[in-house]
Structures are given as C-alpha cells and as structure tokens.
Amino acid sequence: MPRHLNSAILTLAAIAAVVMFVSSGEAVIQPLRGTSMEPVLLAFGKPNSIAFNLSVGYLVSVMFWLLVVFLPERTRRHLLRGNLA
C-alpha cells in the first residue's frame, strides 16, 4: 500500500479524534485545560451525536485496518526483504 495513503488514513484518524472530543459535549479533560487545545474543544458548545458516532466509527475502522491490513502486510514485507537479502 502506498505510503501517502497510509499517511492520509492516519491524518484523518487524528482529525476524527479531535472531532470526537469536540462533538462529545463533555467537559474538557484535566490535562488539556489551559492549553491551546481548550478553545478548539469548546468551539462547538452543543454536542453532536452524528459527528461523534461517525468519528468513533472511523477510529474503530482504523484500528481494525491496522490489525488486519497494515501489520500483516508490513510483517510480510520484512520477511520477503530478509529472505531476498
């Protein structure tokens, strides 16, 4: 799989994580209070269950992609390179 595609998937996962926190409607967690991320997380005062559910679903899908596609492919590639060397 091309590296730019892997980078795009992981970048979208980071965006989904931020959207998950922003749309949850919960208070900002203690380690993020007083940081530059707090205004971003408080930007949307109302919780949005659709955005929250979509972002959680995407993050779970990325976790399964890591386990089912990325890690086995990387292991196979390392084995082939080792055997060919």
Image (cartoon, rainbow, N blue to C red):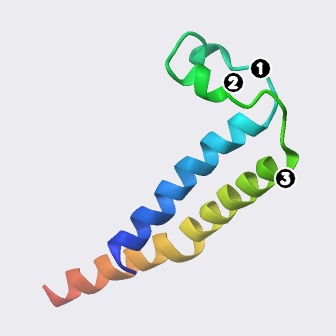
For the residues labelled 3 and 2, say whether their Cβ atoms are less than 8 Å apart. no
Q: Is residue 66 left or right of residue 5?
A: right
Which residue appears at 62% of the width and 44% of the height?
A: 17
Q: Earlier in the sequence, mark 2 or mark 1?
A: 1
Mark identifier at residue 46: none
Quarter of the figure with the C terminus:
bottom left
Q: CA distance from mark 3 to mark 1?
A: 18 Å
Label 1 neighbourhood size at 10 Å, few (<14), some (14-19), many (20+)? few
For the residues labelled 3 and 1, say whether their Cβ atoms are less than 8 Å apart. no
Q: Earlier in the sequence, mark 3 or mark 2?
A: 2
Mark 2 falls on what kind of element?
loop
Q: CA distance from mark 3 to mark 2?
A: 17 Å
Q: Is residue 84 left or right of residue 38?
A: left
- Which residue matches tag 1? 27
Give above or below for 41 relative to 7. Answer: above
Single out the residue that lies furthest toward the left. Answer: 85
Mark identifier at residue 50: 3
Tally of numbered discs? 3
Which residue appears at 84% of the width and 52% of the height?
A: 50
Mark 1 falls on what kind of element?
loop
Give above or below for 25 relative to 5. Answer: above
- Which residue matches tag 2? 42
Q: CA distance from mark 2 to mark 1?
A: 8 Å
Judge by depth and name the residue closer to the eye, 21 or 79. Answer: 21
Quarter of the figure with the N terminus:
bottom left
Check disc 1 and give the amino acid type.
Ala
Which residue appears at 48% of the width and 72% of the height?
A: 70
**x, y (%) of residue 15?**
56, 48
